[in-house]
Image (spheres, helix red, strand yellow):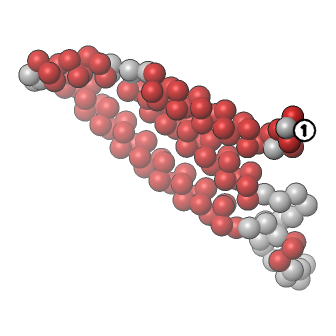
Amino acid sequence: MGANLFTNYGEAVAMILFGIGFGNLLLQSNLIKKIIGLNIMDTAIYLFLAEKGYIKGRVAPIVADGVTSVEAYINPVPSGLVLTGIVVSVSVSALMLALTIRLYRRYHTLDLDEISTLLKKGGQ
């Protein structure tokens, strides 16, 4: 098991990062910290996909020098998923930050517990 961990250290780092982000998402009450936790989780998933798509000794699937053999190139699908995911996560982060700004302007706090208490009292 230990030797396998050292050969797959990229996947192990991705899982540790995901755990850090998930713990941050669950344990923090500050909305900005929750958004940072979600972004850490996104990054962990992109790292995991990039690790799974990479094959040692192969290059990006750009035909050069007339080499058309499939065995010479990596799979382009994980790279495409990572690029698409990055675009989506930037959009989601921007939307979450915009909503956080609106919540702060209305309730004058970023603490989710305080916002929930204010809503139970009747809000503004």
Residue 72: x %, y % from top left? 87, 72
Q: Is 62 on the left-hand or right-hand side of 103?
A: right
Q: Nearer the viewer, residue 104 or 115?
A: 115
* Residue 5 image-quadrant placement: top right
Answer yes or no: is residue 89 visible: yes
Is residue 34 shown above or below 114? below
Answer yes or no: is residue 108 visible: no
Is residue 119 shown above or below 100? above
- For image coordinates 55% across by 43% down, the residue present is 42
* Residue 6 image-quadrant placement: top right
Residue 103: x %, y % from top left? 25, 29
Residue 31: x %, y % from top left? 38, 26
* Residue denoted by label 1: 3
| Figure quadrant of the C terminus | top left
Please tell me how crowded label 1 is: few (under 14), some (14-19), or many (20+) other residues with Cα within 10 Å.
few
Is residue 77 shown above or below 83? below
Q: Nearer the viewer, residue 20 or 104?
A: 20
| Figure quadrant of the N terminus | top right
Extreme residue in the front direction: 1
Q: Is 31 on the left-hand or right-hand side of 49?
A: left
